[in-house]
């Protein structure tokens, strides 16, 4: 099963460290607008929600790309599956930005840009103190989520 | 080439009106770093410290540091620097949040506002494009309403700092509010903004901040980060500053009934744990300013019909002053009063302490029911909530309290009931049981302030990893001892000049970081060589001495470095620090000597030369 960035909204404080580190690692500057991961903060709901490319199996962005600049890359061991931008081919037409339902691909500095999991060592995850984002086996993450929901159900059942 | 700093100063003259951009003075940047230091440097050079704080001759400076906007932990602070109308001394108030980042990303280190607009305006900074817009329709609006209105009129990504009715009405302790509930709270910076007819500053920035040495900066960030990632940080994240209450009460230094005692037997009713569970919109889960690994903020909700409301806070100081010091042991009422202060845009510390001062005057018969309009006994929750609103609107007796506790106590013939220094009210630490805090209160440039030199961190939190104590092989610092305090307070004050100038939040520094971590970050970001630990401390000392010069030229003297009679003469009546007074007369001469100041508190010519400062002002 492939690994990916797993988001736990209940842990996010909205500090945006992920954004800062992403832009710094990929653009040598601290600038949230150039980050590939984004955090939206809803103060009145006391919530913050990180959003990043989900690395679709059959990505809309790739389908829309007229230049063939987007492709799914799986490593031979099957531990990662990444939607990648081939910068040489990209013409910056922005079709991908229209196609992506999540707004997770942008055109910055002339070509399409999106999360590439930093080659299997995502830098944003490294600096998230509350572990709102983690890099994990997606299957295990789903199982853990099921279990946590089940636990909450069990508690409320006892209380009731 | 500028790294860390953007190298640009935005100057907005509201009188003419005229907007200009100039290059930041390189020498000033290297010698005064940013935020607090650079702000006071520009203010000292460009204005007359003796000018009226609320007149057009005073400048209002929004200053960021070289680490603001970077990934330095807590690197999202800005400092409002101006002459404080409450104190007549240098006023510097800091807040964290996206607004600070936006100023940097728009490309400015400093935004200097000069003069006075003919009618209410707000400033809209969209990267290079700067407009002065009419704000007549916003005048009178509360702070959160103002913020959303300005965002709707400008850009969804705009970040806003603004004033509420308290700032407009020039309440002497009005603050500047930014990013829904963050406050540059003290010394009345909001009143200065109001005096300029400036309702808000909105900023959108799309550029980034670059650093001089990427590898070194990343290493410094990771090292700092590892230090901060500890249990105390996690506790601070879950409970926030209100968790401080349970530490402070252990030492018997929780201000109670206008500092008549340091013991409040009902402290549990105000405890941070209670707040985090009962009121926090998310239980034990803080919200963070940008780039902060701690996340100490929270939104609270009160459902009791009498005090129903919702908003950011309350913080520990608010609970101490609007709560305990007013004899008010009801978190619901304290939160409500806090929400009102946030909406009005005024300092909860000074508001709480001023009400507490009036309560003591009332209980001791120096103030009558006719004068106040309602019974003002300690613990009267309705009165506290009502007065917070009246102060902001300068309505009824609120107009009297809007002048702060020094003027209130003096007006009613008992100046000794003012609990503060240089007319600024004490924060929520009883000085008699914390001799370090006492000396810092007496000597801090902006008055009785707890964060411009947190010497109490050594005794209260047992911080033992700063070089200030490590280099002296000091073990735990005893809060009741006074002979060791002059040197510690002077050093910690210099050290905090660096923290407050670099653009980081000082919380990172009692959760694990020290002088070397700060220096590594500043040097990697800017590319300058600070000259090791000694150079760093000398830069801090330079900033502190320049603030002193500002104050002296504004008309303050060494006689203002004092504490209320109660602290100097009346022993604490109970608790762990029972029997203590502040030993100021023993500490102060020693402190002046260590600083190289004369017995009346003025820096010697030799000291000034050593620091590259001069009385004459403009030297940059």
Image (cartoon, grey):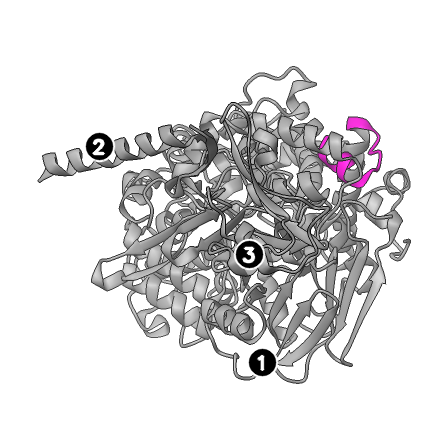
Q: Secondary structure at mark 3?
A: helix
Return the x and y of residue B604 as percentages of the image width and height: 85, 41
Cα gap from disc 2 to disc 1, whole angstroms: 53 Å
Q: How far is the residue under mark 3 from the one under mark 2?
A: 42 Å
Query: Mark 3, chain letter?
Result: A
Reading the image, the residue beneath label 2 is A151
Residue B478 x, y percent position in the rendering: 53, 23
How many numbered discs? 3
Q: Nearer the viewer, mark 3 or mark 2?
A: 3
Residue closest to the eye, B242 or B277: B277
Horizontal side of residue B545 vs A72, given as left or right: right
Based on the displayed image, in which of its 4 quarters is residue B172 positioned?
Answer: bottom right
Question: Tag 1, which chain?
Answer: B
Q: Say whether disc 3 or disc 2 marks the residue closer to the N-terminus.
A: 3
Q: Which residue has dot 1 on it?
A: B135
* Left or right: B605 as drawn, with respect to B487: right
Q: Secondary structure at mark 2?
A: helix
């Amino acid at each position: 099963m492939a690994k990916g960035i797993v988001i736990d909204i209940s842990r996010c404080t909205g500090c945006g460290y992920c954004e800062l580190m992403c832009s710094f690692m990929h653009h040598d500057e601290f600038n949230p607008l150039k980050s590939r991961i984004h955090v939206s903060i809803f103060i009145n709901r006391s919530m913050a929600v990180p959003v990043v490319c989900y690395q679709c199996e059959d990505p809309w962005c790739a389908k829309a790309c007229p230049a063939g600049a987007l492709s799914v890359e799986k490593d031979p061991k099957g531990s990662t599956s990444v939607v990648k931008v081939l910068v040489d081919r990209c013409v910056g037409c922005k079709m991908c930005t229209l196609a992506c339902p999540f707004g997770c691909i942008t055109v910055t500095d002339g070509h399409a840009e999106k999360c590439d999991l930093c080659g299997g060592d995502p830098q944003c995850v490294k600096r998230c103190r509350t572990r709102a984002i983690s890099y994990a086996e997606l299957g295990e993450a789903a199982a853990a989520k099921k279990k946590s929901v089940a636990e909450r159900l069990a508690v409320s059942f006892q209380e009731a | 080439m500028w790294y860390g700093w953007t190298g640009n100063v935005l100057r907005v003259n509201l009188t003419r009106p005229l907007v200009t951009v100039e290059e930041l003075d390189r020498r000033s940047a290297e010698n005064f770093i940013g935020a607090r230091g650079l702000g006071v440097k520009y203010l000292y050079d460009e204005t007359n410290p003796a000018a009226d704080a609320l007149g057009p001759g005073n400048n209002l400076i929004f200053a960021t540091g070289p680490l603001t906007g970077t990934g330095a932990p807590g690197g999202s602070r800005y400092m409002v620097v101006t002459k404080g109308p409450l104190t007549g001394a240098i006023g510097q108030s800091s807040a964290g949040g996206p607004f600070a980042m936006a100023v940097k990303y728009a490309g400015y280190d400093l935004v200097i506002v000069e003069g006075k607009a003919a009618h209410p305006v707000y400033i809209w900074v969209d990267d290079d494009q700067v407009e002065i817009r009419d704000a007549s329709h916003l005048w009178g609006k509360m702070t959160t309403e103002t913020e959303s209105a300005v965002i709707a009129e400008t850009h969804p990504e705009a970040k806003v700092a603004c004033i509420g009715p308290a700032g407009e009405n020039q309440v002497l302790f009005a603050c500047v509010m930014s990013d829904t509930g963050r406050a540059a709270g003290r010394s009345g910076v909001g009143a200065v903004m109001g005096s300029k007819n400036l309702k808000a500053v909105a900023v959108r920035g799309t550029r980034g901040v670059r650093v001089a040495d990427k590898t070194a900066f990343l290493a410094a960030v990771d090292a700092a980060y590892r230090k901060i990632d500890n249990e105390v940080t996690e506790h601070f994240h879950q409970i926030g500053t209100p968790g401080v209450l349970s530490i402070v009460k252990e030492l018997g230094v929780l201000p109670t009934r206008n500092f008549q005692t340091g013991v409040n037997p009902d402290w549990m009713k105000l405890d941070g744990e209670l707040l985090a569970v009962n009121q926090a919109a998310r239980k034990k889960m803080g919200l963070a300013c940008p780039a902060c690994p701690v996340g100490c903020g929270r939104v609270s909700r009160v459902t009791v019909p009498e005090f129903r409301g919702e908003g950011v806070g309350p913080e520990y100081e608010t609970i101490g002053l609007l709560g305990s010091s007013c004899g008010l042991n009801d978190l619901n009422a304290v939160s409500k009063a806090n929400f009102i202060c946030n909406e009005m845009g005024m300092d909860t510390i000074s508001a709480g302490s001023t009400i507490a001062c009036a309560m003591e005057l009332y209980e001791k018969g120096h103030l009558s029911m006719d004068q106040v309009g309602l019974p003002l006994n300690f613990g009267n929750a309705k009165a506290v909530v009502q007065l917070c609103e009246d102060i902001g609107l300068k309505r009824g007796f609120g107009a009297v309290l809007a002048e702060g506790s020094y003027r209130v106590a003096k007006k009613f013939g008992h100046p000794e009931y003012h609990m503060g220094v240089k007319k600024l009210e004490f924060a929520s630490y009883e000085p008699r049981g914390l001799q370090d805090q006492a000396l810092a209160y007496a000597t801090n440039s902006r008055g009785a302030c707890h964060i411009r030199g947190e010497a109490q961190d050594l005794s209260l939190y047992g911080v033992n990893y700063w070089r200030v104590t490590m280099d002296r092989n000091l073990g735990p610092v005893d809060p009741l001892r006074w002979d060791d305090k002059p040197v510690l307070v002077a050093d910690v004050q210099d050290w905090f000049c660096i923290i407050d100038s670099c653009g980081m939040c000082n919380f990172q520094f009692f959760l694990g970081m020290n002088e070397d971590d700060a220096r590594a970050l500043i040097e990697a970001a800017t590319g300058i060589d600070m000259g090791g630990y000694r150079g760093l401390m000398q830069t801090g000392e330079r900033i502190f001495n320049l603030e002193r010069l500002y104050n002296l030229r504004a008309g303050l003297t060494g006689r203002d470095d004092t504490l209320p009679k109660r602290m100097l003469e009346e022993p604490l009546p109970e608790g762990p620090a029972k029997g203590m007074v502040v030993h100021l007369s023993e500490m102060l001469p020693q402190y002046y000597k260590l600083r190289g100041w004369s017995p009346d508190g003025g820096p010697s010519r030799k000291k000034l030369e050593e620091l590259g400062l001069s009385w004459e002002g403009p030297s940059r």
